[in-house]
Amino acid sequence: MDAASLVGAGARVLGVAVDELRSRSRDREVVRARELLMLIGVERYRLRVVDLAEALGRSPDGMTKALARGVRRRKEQEGFLEAAERLDHALARVGVAKEQD
């Protein structure tokens, strides 16, 4: 499973267009989606930040910061951990996890 596959499947699950994820948008929903994808992509699917950043059309520096925000929000923001778990389970259901094995 590669970063582009994760981003495409994750975008569908989260209801955000890939073009929006790749845009410069700072819309709260888009920022949260990027953070969730970075968190799940790196921690669950062991993808590299640089590969996810490329799939998202963003800089590795920016996506490293998004990952750090996601880790912080998981601990501090009510509902973020649950959103990450829902995304992970949904990706597993649509078969993204199978590609990794």
Image: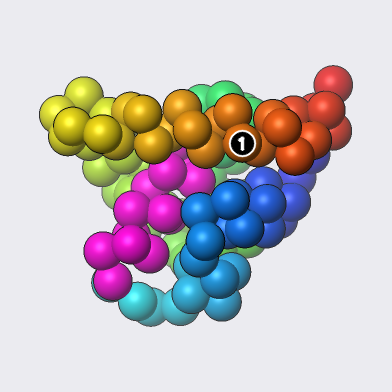
- Furthest residue toward left: 76
Identify whether 26 is placed above or below 93. below
Q: Which residue is mark 1?
A: 90
Residue in view at x 85 percent, y 21 percent? 101
Specify the quadrant that holds the N terminus.
top right
Residue in view at x 51 percent, y 54 percent? 14
Q: Position of residue 5 (x, y in %)?
A: 74, 51
Residue 13 shown left or right of residue 93 in the figure:
left
Q: Quadrant of residue 30 in the image?
A: bottom left
Identify whether 4 is placed above or below 27. above
Residue in view at x 67 percent, y 58 percent? 8
User: Which residues are drawn in magenta?
Assistant: 27-40
Q: Position of residue 66 (x, y in %)?
A: 34, 49
Instruction: Count neighbours of disc 1 (C-alpha within 10 A) and say few if under 14, some if 14 to 19, many if 20 or more.
Output: some
SS assignment for the magenta stretch, majority? helix
Q: Is residue 40 visible?
A: no
Identify whether 70 is placed above or below 59. above
Identify whether 55 is placed above or below 37. below
Viewer-proximal residue among 18 and 71: 18
